[in-house]
Image (tube, helix red, strand yellow):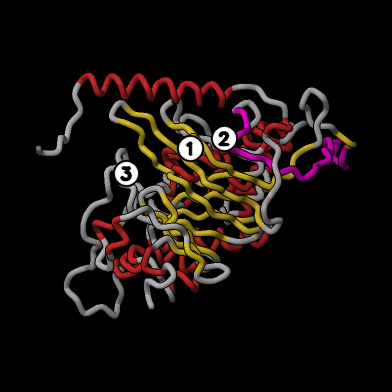
């Protein structure tokens, strides 16, 4: 009997009913008020700023459940840059949106897993308001902070403002669509200070905005402050986005393909700027891109994703000089080089499997030129190659390469 490649109306209605029940339960949990003790946790390693542990982020559709992030685990160490690389649709941006809790609900939900983040939060009173301990020379209130470890996946949405924008900020992929066209740059920059800095005044917000525009290398900050987004070039808009992300001195910056819409010269300037700012603010960066050249230049550690899973991770030297997974090797072969004497570019054959009905075996099996019999069994576990290098592939299990 031939395999059926469609769903009947009855099957679609059944799936939609089951999915609606599951996603509304998750949506209700997301907005439920909780005491702080329910989303406080501890880090497994004190040297990390962020720990993502078995994260599952799903999108509930009428056709079934799309497992966009399927058991992802990796860490971001303090003061380091971690590059997330993979094809379009592999789950890079959905992972970052899960960390920021910016998933489009009710369809998009964090189904399970932990996102542990080391935050420096204000000390708060019984009502949750920051406690002022005095004032500075300008009369602005001073707020005492304390270190707390939050499980972002469990934080209710009414508490997420504690970290989003102030502790973790994001540089989005396309600055033109991320900036509001009807407000000036100054209005949008000032808003960040008003939202995240208690006791901020008009004067202090403007001073902070001009300081940040100057920090990202804008020569005429006052003019840009009074401009609208359409009056600026792509590179200038991206610098504005970076200044907005840095306005509250975040501990972690998520840069989602920050140079995609820019020409090569401006790309180099923006990457150099990000590198300098990381040193100045002594923070960490989660850099999402599909450009291996950017990863090689910027990252300390690399996480390679495929079809919603991490398939290899290690230091940048290990991933580039000793790639283990056939997919990682294929990605590197796909990048054009000056040394190549071929008229055609290398491409990985085949297609990514349907994200709704993922197989139980290795997701890369149908596209892999090194496939062995064991690849048709259970999905491979993450295998330790060194203290920092891990790969999910049956080729490297004990006895397979002897």
The residue that label 3 is drawn on is: 358
Q: Position of residue 130 (x, y in %)?
A: 79, 31
Q: Position of residue 262 (x, y in %)?
A: 39, 54
Residue 319 shows in this picture? yes
Q: Is residue 180 above or below residue 99?
A: above
- The residue at 64%/42% (across/down) is 209
Q: Check disc 3: other Cα within 10 Å, few if <14, some if 14-19, many if 20+.
A: some
Are discs 3 and 1 less than 8 Å apart at CB?
Answer: no
Q: Which residues are magenta?
A: 135-156
Q: Quadrant of residue 123?
A: top right
Query: Which residue sits furthest right?
Result: 134
Q: Is residue 54 above or below residue 184?
A: below
The residue that label 1 is drawn on is: 179
Check if residue 217 falls in the magenta segment. Answer: no
The residue that label 2 is drawn on is: 188
Looking at the image, is mark 3 or mark 2 nearer the viewer?
Answer: 3
Give the CA distance from mark 3 to mark 2.
42 Å
Q: Quadrant of residue 224?
A: top right
């Amino acid at each position: 009997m031939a395999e059926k490649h469609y769903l009947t109306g009855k099957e679609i209605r059944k799936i939609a009913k089951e999915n609606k029940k599951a996603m509304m339960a998750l949506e209700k949990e997301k907005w439920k008020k909780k005491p702080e003790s329910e989303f406080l946790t501890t880090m497994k390693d004190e040297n990390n700023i962020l720990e993502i542990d078995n994260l599952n982020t799903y999108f509930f559709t009428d056709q079934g459940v799309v497992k966009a992030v399927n058991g992802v685990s990796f860490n971001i160490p303090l003061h380091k840059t971690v590059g997330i690389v993979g094809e379009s649709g592999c789950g890079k941006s959905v992972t970052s949106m899960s960390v920021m809790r910016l998933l489009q609900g009710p369809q998009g939900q964090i189904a399970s897993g932990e996102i542990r983040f080391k935050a420096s939060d204000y000390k708060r009173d019984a009502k949750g308001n920051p406690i002022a301990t005095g004032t500075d020379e300008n009369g602005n209130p001073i707020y005492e902070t304390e270190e707390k470890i939050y499980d972002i996946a469990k934080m209710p949405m009414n508490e997420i403002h504690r970290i989003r924008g102030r502790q973790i900020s994001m540089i989005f992929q396309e600055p033109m669509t991320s900036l509001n066209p009807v407000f000036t740059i100054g209005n949008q920059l000032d808003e960040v200070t008003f939202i995240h800095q208690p006791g901020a005044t008009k004067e202090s917000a403007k001073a902070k905005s001009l300081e940040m525009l100057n920090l990202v290398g804008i020569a005429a900050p006052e003019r840009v402050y009074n401009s609208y987004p359409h009056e600026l070039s792509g590179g200038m808009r991206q610098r504005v986005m970076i200044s907005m992300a840095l306005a509250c001195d975040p501990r972690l910056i998520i840069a989602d393909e920050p140079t995609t819409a820019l020409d090569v010269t401006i790309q180099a300037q923006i990457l150099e700027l990000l590198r300098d700012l990381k040193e100045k603010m002594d923070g960490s960066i989660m850099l999402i891109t599909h450009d291996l050249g950017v990863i090689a230049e910027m990252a300390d550690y690399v996480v390679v994703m495929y079809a919603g899973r991490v398939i290899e991770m290690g230091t940048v030297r290990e991933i580039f000089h000793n790639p283990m997974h056939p997919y990682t090797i294929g990605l590197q072969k796909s990048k054009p080089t000056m040394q190549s004497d071929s008229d055609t570019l290398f491409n990985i054959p085949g297609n990514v499997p349907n994200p709704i009905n993922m197989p139980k075996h290795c997701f890369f099996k149908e596209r892999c030129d090194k496939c062995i019999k064991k690849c048709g069994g259970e999905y491979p576990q993450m295998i330790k190659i060194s203290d920092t290098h891990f790969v999910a592939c049956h080729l490297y299990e004990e006895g397979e390469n002897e």
